[in-house]
Amino acid sequence: MLVGFGLSYLALEKGGVWGTLRIGPWVAWTEIGSPNPDPYTKAYASRTGALEMTRAEGIKFIAEVDSDGNNLQRNCSYRIDGSTPEATLWTLTATEKDGTSIAAQWGSIAMNSARVNRAEDGSFAINVGPYLASGNWLEIAGEGNFILVLNFYDSSIFSVADMQGNTLPAIIEERCDV
């Protein structure tokens, strides 16, 4: 019984092996919105209470840690570095675990694929943190841990099956103040 509880906790809290797709620090619940989701996906959806996208709408990836496995902290600045698979639109937001935005009061709530500055090869770097940064910058406020949410829209172009050979941007810690 204890083993079953432990495995369930891991699956729900850390995005375990059942019903999830993990690419670097990013995790997606791939069965959300499917007609017959597995029990772990049902439990996750019930536990979070969030309105999730269905497969027909897109896919949502969440990162609680950086690419080195360290928890994301609001007193740190991060560089979201790389590229994304093709999609009609994607958005990047910084939130509390419950989905509440932690964007600075006068800052932008999200970055998106339509307004991000890119290099010639299509890659980009987005700075996320409380410190002024040049280029693409998503300013955050407050204290404690946070999560990054990367939503991809238009699953006719972007499907879970297409993700198998793709990568998502790295999350690189740039600076932390105590």
Image (tube, rainbow, N blue to C red):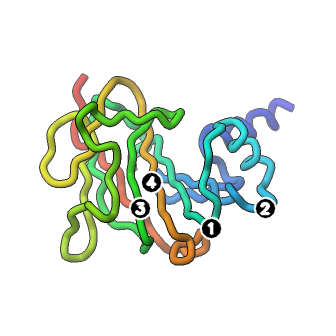
* Residue 92: x %, y % from top left: 38, 52
The residues tagged by marks 3 and 2 sit, at their Cα atoms, a distance apart of 24 Å
The residues tagged by marks 1 and 4 sit, at their Cα atoms, a distance apart of 17 Å
Residue lying at 27% horizontally and 50% vertically, measured from the top left: 79
Q: Of the two numbered discs 2 and 1 on the same chain, state the one appearing first in sequence.
A: 2
Give the residue at mark 2: 35
On the question of residue 143 being in view, the answer is yes
Give the residue at mark 3: 90
- Indicate which disc residue 150 carries: 4
Q: Of the two numbered discs 4 and 3 on the same chain, state the one appearing first in sequence.
A: 3
Q: Quadrant of residue 85?
A: bottom left
Residue lying at 31% horizontally and 63% vertically, measured from the top left: 82
How many discs appear?
Answer: 4
Is 160 displayed left or right of 94 in the figure? Answer: right
Looking at the image, is 130 positioned above or below residue 89?
Answer: above
Looking at the image, is 53 positioned above or below residue 105?
Answer: below
Label 2 amino acid? Pro
